[in-house]
C-alpha cells in the first residue's frame, strides 16, 4: 500500500489513525484525507506525505474526481454520523448520510475499476441490536436486528456492500466496531463525558462530586481507539475480501464500573444521579463481542487496558 485515502479524517478515529501511521513501519507513502471541514487541520507527519481536501461526500462528482486523480491503493471509510443519540433526533438524516456517502464510494469503485483499490468500510456493533445476555459474546454469524436509527443505517450499509460485492466483485473488507474511546473523544460520548465531569470537579476542589448520567447499568465492550486503528490497518492488509469482522476486546464492563474506575484514579467519592433526559430508548442492556475471527485473520490482540485508556484521557 503506497497511497491511502481516508474519509472522515478530521474525526476522533481519523486523527488517531494518522498518528498510528506516523509510527508504523509499513505506513503508506502518501495519504489523502477527506472531510467536510472547510479548514484543513494543521498537522506534521514524518513517515508519509499528507494532503487534506474539504469535500461534501454526499455529492458524488467531487469525490469521484479526487479518487481518479489520487489513484489510491486503499481507502479507509470513517466518515459517518456516528452518534446513536443524534440518530434518534434525525433518523432520516442519519440514514441518508451514512448510506448515501457509502453509495458514492461504491459507485466510484465501479467507475474506476481499473484502479483496483481495497475499501475498508468501518461499521458498528449496533447492527446486532438487543441480543439476549446469554448469547454473549456476539459472533459475526449472529443475526442482526438493530434497534435504533444509527444501527439501521449501518445494517443498510452492510447490505449495500454485499450486493456490490456480488454484482461487481469489489474488494471490500467490513468491520463491526464495538464501543471505543480514548484521548480526544467528544464529550457527546459516554466515557468522555464522565471524564470531563469528574475531572472538572477535581480541578474545582470538589472531592465528593455528583455526576449526572443515563443508565449506568449498561454493559459494553470498550476498546482503546489506538487498538482500534491498529486493527483497521491489519484488516486492510490481511482481511479477506467480502468478510465482516468484529473489532472488540471481548470483555464487558458496566458504565457504573467505568465511573468507579475514573473516581478511583482521581481520588473522588462520586455520587451518581440518573437523569431521565439522558436515558435513550431501547438501549441494549449487554453488548459484548467475540474478536476471534479478527485474531485468526490478522494476529491482532488488544494491548491497552481500559484503566490506562482512562488515565490517558485524564492527562490529555
Image: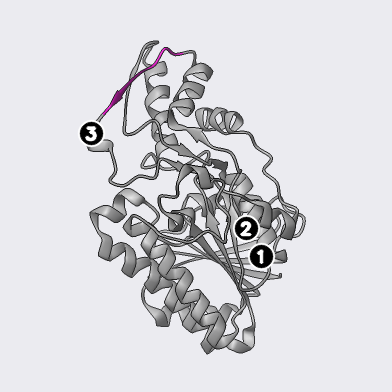
Of the residues tagged 3 and 2, which is closer to the observer?
3
Residue extending farthest to the front is 134
CA distance for labels 1 and 3: 42 Å
Of the residues tagged 1 and 3, which is closer to the observer?
3
- Secondary structure of the residue carrying tag 3 is helix
Magenta residues span: 268-274
Q: Is residue 52 left or right of residue 95?
A: right
- Decide: few, some or many residues near mark 1? Use Cα within 10 Å; few <14, some 14-19, many ≥20: many
Q: Which residue is mark 3?
A: 276
Q: Position of residue 224 (x, y in %)?
A: 58, 41
- Secondary structure of the residue carrying tag 1 is helix
Q: Which residue is mark 2?
A: 232
- Are discs 2 and 1 less than 8 Å apart at CB? yes
Q: Identify whether 159 is placed above or below 208.
A: below
Residue name at image x 36 percent, y 58 percent: 150
Q: Position of residue 222 (x, y in %)?
A: 53, 40
Q: Identify whether 163 is placed above or below 136.
A: below
- N-term-proximal mark, 3 vs 2: 2
**Residue 190 located within the stretch drawn in magenta:** no
Q: Which residue is mark 1?
A: 236
- N-term-proximal mark, 1 vs 3: 1
- Decide: few, some or many residues near mark 2? Use Cα within 10 Å; few <14, some 14-19, many ≥20: many
Amino acid at each position: 500500500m503506497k497511497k491511502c485515502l481516508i474519509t472522515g479524517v478530521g474525526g476522533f478515529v481519523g486523527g488517531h489513525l494518522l498518528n498510528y501511521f506516523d509510527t508504523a513501519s509499513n505506513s503508506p507513502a502518501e495519504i489523502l484525507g477527506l472531510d467536510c471541514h472547510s479548514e484543513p487541520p494543521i498537522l506534521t507527519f514524518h513517515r508519509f506525505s499528507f494532503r487534506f481536501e474539504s469535500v461534501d461526500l454526499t455529492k458524488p462528482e467531487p469525490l469521484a474526481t479526487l479518487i481518479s486523480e489520487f489513484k489510491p491503493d486503499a481507502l479507509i471509510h470513517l466518515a459517518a454520523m456516528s452518534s446513536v443519540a443524534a440518530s434518534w433526533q434525525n433518523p432520516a438524516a442519519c440514514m441518508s448520510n451514512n448510506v448515501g456517502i457509502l453509495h458514492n464510494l461504491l459507485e466510484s469503485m465501479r467507475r474506476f475499476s481499473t484502479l483496483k483499490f481495497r475499501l475498508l468500510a468501518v461499521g458498528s456493533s449496533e447492527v446486532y441490536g438487543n441480543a439476549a445476555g446469554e448469547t454473549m459474546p456476539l459472533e459475526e454469524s449472529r443475526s442482526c436486528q438493530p434497534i435504533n436509527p444509527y444501527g439501521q443505517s449501518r445494517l443498510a450499509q452492510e447490505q449495500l456492500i454485499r450486493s456490490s460485492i456480488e454484482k461487481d466483485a469489489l474488494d471490500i473488507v467490513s468491520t463491526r466496531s464495538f464501543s471505543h474511546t480514548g484521548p480526544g473523544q467528544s464529550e457527546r460520548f459516554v466515557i468522555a463525558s464522565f471524564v470531563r465531569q469528574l475531572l472538572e470537579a477535581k480541578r474545582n476542589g470538589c472531592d465528593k462530586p455528583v455526576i449526572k448520567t443515563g443508565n449506568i447499568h449498561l454493559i459494553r465492550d470498550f476498546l482503546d481507539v489506538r487498538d482500534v486503528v491498529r486493527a483497521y490497518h491489519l484488516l486492510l492488509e490481511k482481511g479477506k475480501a467480502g468478510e465482516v469482522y468484529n473489532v472488540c476486546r471481548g470483555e464487558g464492563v458496566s458504565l457504573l464500573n467505568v465511573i468507579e474506575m475514573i473516581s478511583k484514579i482521581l481520588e473522588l467519592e462520586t455520587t451518581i444521579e440518573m437523569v431521565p433526559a439522558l436515558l435513550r430508548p431501547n438501549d441494549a442492556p449487554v453488548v459484548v463481542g467475540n474478536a476471534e475471527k479478527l485474531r485468526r485473520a490478522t494476529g491482532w490482540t488488544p494491548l491497552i487496558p481500559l484503566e490506562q485508556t482512562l488515565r490517558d484521557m485524564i492527562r490529555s
